[in-house]
Image (cartoon, rainbow, N blue to C red):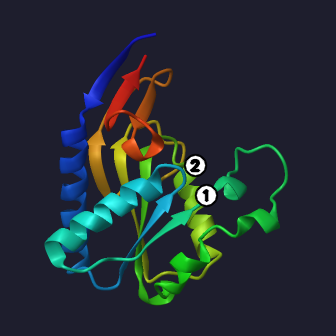
């Protein structure tokens, strides 16, 4: 099993800054935006994008986390309505979903099933004005008709390959993206 780095810490930083610029440009400013990171690494990336937007626009956009596990269609077991409280209350109080463009932030887009689950979870909290998808890595192999609006890097992969995202906030020595064969 071989592994090779496909993004360094600096490349990741540049990609997230660029994505922040693209998000603001598409919105026509930072007002009316909220970033919702899909658990587990999405909230970390959403925080980094929000910090980049704040540095360039002087506005801190709200950030929340979203746990989509109860909404996965490829998960064993029944839907657990008690586990479906997916956006922390503090995150919900910071913005009105109906008047907000929500940007879902995830680390890797693969089959599209996580993004679909995130849309279902988000709609349980109200219908946003618009929803966009931002991913650090798009590796292809979609099983659903889902396309990201903002991509850090496109990395064509074989199905048997794996993408690993290492982040300092998760205990990694340094930020990097690794392709594992």
Give the farthest residue toward the right. 78
Question: Residue at left 46%, top 10%?
Answer: 1
Q: Is residue 43 above or below residue 97?
A: above
Question: Residue at left 53%, top 85%?
Answer: 93
Do tag 2 and tag 1 residues touch (Cβ < 8 Å)? yes
Q: CA distance from mark 2 to mark 1?
A: 6 Å
Give the farthest residue toward the left. 56
Question: Residue at left 56%, top 51%?
Answer: 114
Q: Examine the rendering and report whether any part of residue 147 can be seen.
A: no
Question: Residue at left 31%, top 59%?
Answer: 48
* On-image quarter of the C terminus: top left
Place of residue 110 in the rendered image (x, y in percent of width and height, measured from the top left): 47, 40
Tag of residue 117: 1
Q: Which residue is mark 2?
A: 113
Residue 171 in which image quadrant? top left
Tag of residue 83: none
Residue 22 in which image quadrant? bottom left
Q: Is residue 92 left or right of residue 31?
A: right
Place of residue 39 in the rendered image (x, y in percent of width and height, measured from the top left): 54, 54
Secondary structure type for disc 2: helix
Q: Examine the rendering and report whether any part of residue 41 can be seen.
A: yes
């Amino acid at each position: 099993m071989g592994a090779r780095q496909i993004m360094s810490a600096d490349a990741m930083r540049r990609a997230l800054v660029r994505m922040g610029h693209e998000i603001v440009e598409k919105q026509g400013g930072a007002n009316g935006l909220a970033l919702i990171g899909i658990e587990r690494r999405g909230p970390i990336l959403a925080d980094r994008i929000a910090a980049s937007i704040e540095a360039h626009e002087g506005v801190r956009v709200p950030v929340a986390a979203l746990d989509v596990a109860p909404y996965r269609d490829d998960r064993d077991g029944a839907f657990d309505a008690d586990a479906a409280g997916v956006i922390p209350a503090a995150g919900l109080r910071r913005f009105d979903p109906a008047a907000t463009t929500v940007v879902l932030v995830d680390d890797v887009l693969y089959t599209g099933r996580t993004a679909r689950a995130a849309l279902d979870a988000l709609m349980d909290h109200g219908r946003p004005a618009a929803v966009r998808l931002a991913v650090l890595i798009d590796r292809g192999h979609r099983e659903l008709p889902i396309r990201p609006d903002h991509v850090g890097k496109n990395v064509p992969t074989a199905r048997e390959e794996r993408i690993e995202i290492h982040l300092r906030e998760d205990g990694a020595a340094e930020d990097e993206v690794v392709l594992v064969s």
